[in-house]
Image (tube, rainbow, N blue to C red):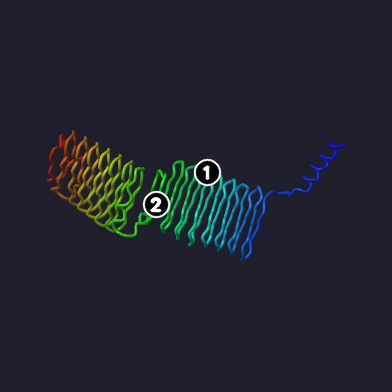
């Protein structure tokens, strides 16, 4: 008899269960508490300070206007906090979190390969375990990438980062702000159309100017340093570096290591430094100066170019 009663209870529960474990729920203009199912839900908070819980797999959540608390739960969720000072816990899974409006937000990515993007407002972003991509936007953010191989787009004007293996420095709004970029990781440091001072720091970095008269330093590591336009001062530092001056009257220092140095257009001065370097100034301005420095160096020179300390010299040709 007990077994029959037990089976009857189980049958009753199954009969009353919903056909699909998912829901679409919409809040009002006031405070809302929306709770999803174990399945993929759509939860829209709209106005007011909302509390939204995704719970299950693959939820779409929009907090709307207001100071919201949002939890994604498990699964690969898409979360938009909206306007307001929001607290977002994406949870486990490969989540996409966009906090693209104004407010002072705190975002936890949680385990998984997350994409987190904010824009205006002072934000605190914690990537958590996984290979995350984080874009801090325009404001003064704090970014802790957490364990994993992470990529962070950093505003050199103000943002602070930690545990971020790959940094791409963008949105440099005033000259010389590039000088705050150097850290111990492998980074991409981008200048602007005005005169920048950019440092790669330790690691294998890419340091690139743009317009203006830039001062570009690769520092330690096997770096790539590109001057582009303007009269630039460039230094590879220690390591096997690649330097290219571009247009403008540039001064290039290879530093210690086996470097590849190309002057580009206009009148350049090249100093190879220690190591076995390959050096080629531009050919459009005769009389350029090349000092290869210590080591066994190879220089390819144009008409009238002057050289010192170069063991092998070729006039016009290829490496």
Cα gap from disc 1 to disc 2, whole angstroms: 22 Å
In this view, 183 is above or below 213: above
- Could you tell me which quadrant the C terminus lies in? top left
Question: Can you say which quadrant of the picture contains the N terminus?
Answer: top right
Residue 249, x across and y down, in percent: 19, 52
Q: Farthest residue toward the front?
A: 2
Vertical relation: 119 (above or below) 40: below
Query: Between residues 214 and 202, which one lies in front from this camera angle?
Result: 202
Question: What is the x, y in percent for residue 38?
Answer: 66, 47
Q: In the picture, residue 273 is in which quadrant?
A: top left
Instruction: State which mark lies toward you, 1 or 2.
Output: 2
Question: Residue 178's x, y, as percent?
Answer: 31, 53
- Image mark for residue 140: none
Between discs 1 and 2, the one toward the N terminus: 1
Are dots 1 and 2 in contact, CB under 8 Å? no
Q: Residue furthest right?
A: 1
Q: Helix or strand or loop: what does disc 2 sit on? A: strand
* Residue drawn at point x = 31 percent, y = 46 percent: 200
Q: Farthest residue toward the bottom?
A: 29
Residue at (24%, 39%) from the top-left corner?
A: 259
All told, the count of numbered labels is: 2
User: In this figure, which residue is indicated by the disc labeled 2?
Assistant: 160
Q: Where is residue 58 in the image (x, y as percent from the top left)?
A: 60, 48
Find residue 112 and name its label.
Answer: 1
The residue lying at 49 percent from left, 51 percent from top is: 116
Label 1 neighbourhood size at 10 Å, few (<14), some (14-19), many (20+)?
A: many
Q: Dot 2: within a 10 Å radius of its alpha carbon, few (fewer than 14), some, or many (20 or more) residues? A: some
**Image side of residue 155 versus residue 230, left or right:** right
Secondary element under disc 1, as helix, strand or loop, is: loop
In-front residue for pair 232/145: 145
In this image, 3 relative to 187: left or right?
Answer: right
């Amino acid at each position: 008899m007990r077994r029959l009663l037990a089976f009857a209870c189980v049958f009753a529960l199954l009969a009353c269960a919903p056909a699909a474990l998912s829901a679409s729920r919409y809040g009002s203009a006031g405070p809302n508490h929306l709770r999803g199912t174990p399945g993929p839900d759509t939860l829209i908070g709209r106005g007011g300070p909302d509390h939204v819980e995704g719970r299950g797999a693959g939820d779409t959540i929009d907090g709307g206007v207001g100071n919201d608390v949002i939890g994604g739960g498990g699964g690969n969720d898409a979360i938009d906090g909206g306007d307001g000072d929001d607290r977002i816990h994406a949870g486990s899974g490969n989540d996409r979190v966009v906090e693209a409006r104004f407010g002072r937000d705190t975002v936890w990515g949680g385990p998984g390969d997350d994409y987190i993007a904010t824009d205006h407002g002072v934000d605190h972003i914690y990537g958590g375990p996984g290979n995350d991509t984080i874009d801090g936007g325009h404001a003064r953010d704090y970014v802790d990438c957490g364990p994993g191989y992470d990529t962070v787009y950093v505003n050199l004007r103000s943002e602070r980062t930690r545990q971020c293996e790959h940094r791409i420095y963008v949105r440099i709004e005033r000259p010389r702000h590039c000088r705050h970029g150097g850290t111990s990781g492998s980074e991409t440091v981008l200048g602007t159309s005005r005169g920048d001072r950019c440092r790669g720091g330790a690691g294998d970095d890419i340091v690139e100017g743009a317009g203006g008269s830039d001062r570009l330093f690769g520092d330690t590591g096997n770096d790539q340093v590109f001057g582009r336009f303007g009269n630039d001062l460039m230094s590879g530092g220690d390591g096997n570096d690649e330097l290219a001056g571009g247009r403008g009257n540039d001064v290039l220092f290879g530093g210690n290591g086996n470097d590849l140095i190309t002057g580009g257009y206009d009148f350049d001065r090249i100093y190879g430094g220690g190591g076995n370097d390959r050096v080629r100034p531009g050919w459009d301005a005769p009389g350029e100066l090349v000092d290869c420095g210590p080591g066994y160096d190879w220089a390819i020179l144009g008409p009238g170019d002057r050289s010192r300390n170069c063991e092998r010299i070729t006039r016009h040709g290829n490496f």
